[in-house]
Amino acid sequence: MGEVYVVGVSMTKFGPHPGKGVKDLAREAVAACLADAGAEVSAVEAAFYANAVQDWVEGQVTIGGQIALREAGIQRVPIVNVENACASGSTALWLAVNYLRAGQADVVLAVGTEKMVFPDDRERMGRVMKAFEGGIDIYDIQATFDRLAAEGAGVDAGGGEGHRSLFMEIYANLARAHMRRFGTTQRQMAVVASKNHYHASLNPKCHYNREMSVEEVLAGRPLGYPLTVPMCSPLSDGAAAALVCTEAGLRRLGVPRAAAARIRACVLASSSEREFGDLEDHICRRAAFRAYEQAGVGPEDIDVAEVHDAASFGEIFQSELLGFCPIGEGGPLAESGATRLGGRIPINVSGGLESKGHPIGATGLGQIYELVVQLRGRAGARQVEGARLAIQENGGGLLGVEEASAVVTILGRD
């Protein structure tokens, strides 16, 4: 149970990649990750490969990782295929960390890819959208939506209803429930989206790089109220990777500890049956405070955070669940400017999912990429000054009234 470190990271640009498939994206991410660590492919002793929709979209089932990673030069070593909804990439990291802690290897790779944009292929785009339906209990779909809708009943949409999609409707219901309980406003959600579009303008790897004012966000095409399109993540292609090692692996690669990011905690949790209002028992709350305990730190010690904001409401809610403010006060926290670059607790300085993009299998590892770059002090215009402790939250699916799976990781710079 020795220390575990991230010694190499990479992330392709997220967004449409016409002419590229998962093999191309995986090869690009793996090569860049190894180059970042100064390592050869022969150093990799095992690999954990995350992907969520390729089987639905292209019919490549059961051995996606073995096929994609062979193109990147990885073969013979153990390769594990990981699918855990939107938390797939982070789950690959969790597996890599625990493989190292179990003494099975000293240098392992976590990589995630996703190909989700097929603008000239309506059939494949339909399969992408169909894949999302598998992220909830297919035997209980109507009851799930009825339960969520009841929690947000009575919140006036003000004529703002528009096009619906499965998970954006879930987010809309959760947002309305939060509005009903705590007085959170649509404008506060727009403040988050505007802030993250500004952050994205500083990050060339984002799907979108254009700043948007709060008014522009509010004027965007409506989805399920209170969400508008600029508050929600786009479908994206992309890949990301992290090379993880033990202290023996550091020595083998010739990487000094000061150049690596130490994994202080990496916690995977699953949903539980609970009452909607029991937010202290929320899956992400449980995972976060277990991670704080493992790392020996608290929310007040965190310098920068990347959280799962497939809709901007998600950032508001996660800022509460991670303990950056009391439950119910995430909206005012965002409005205060505290979560903006230069604020008390900068969140999603990468641009967040609604601007950076959300290639599901790569999303969590894309968050890790951002945080490692921040801890190295190499984030350029979006650098959080003096960042030494970082947290990542990545959730996936929906079961009952919360995410089906969630990973919280804490990284530090020694």
Image (cartoon, rainbow, N blue to C red):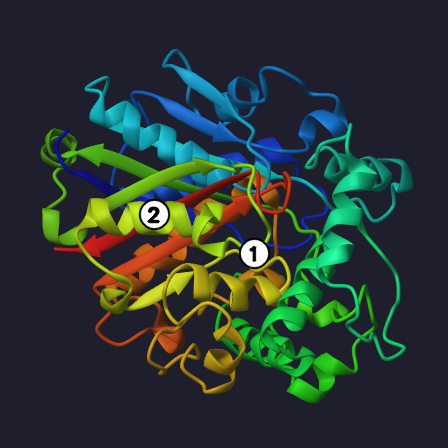
Measure the C-alpha gap from mark 2 to mark 1.
Answer: 25 Å
Q: Earlier in the sequence, mark 2 or mark 1?
A: 1
Q: Position of residue 149 (x, y in %)?
A: 77, 56
Kind of residue sitting beneath label 2: Thr
Q: Nearer the viewer, residue 257 or 74?
A: 257
Q: Nearer the viewer, mark 2 or mark 1?
A: 1
Specify whether residue 88 is in view: yes
59 vs 35, left or right, is: right
Count of marks placed on residues: 2
Q: Which residue is mark 2?
A: 409
| Quadrant of the snapshot with the N terminus | top left
- As drawn, the label of residue 286 is none
Q: Which residue is mark 1?
A: 277
Q: Residue at x 49, y 73 (%)?
A: 330
Picture quarter containing residue 86? top right
Q: Residue at x 73, y 63 (%)?
A: 152
Specify whether residue 263 is in view: no
- Against 413, residue 62 (above or below) is above
91 vs 353, left or right, is: left
Picture quarter containing residue 227? bottom right
- Against 178, residue 134 (above or below) is above
Q: Nearer the viewer, residue 142 or 65?
A: 142
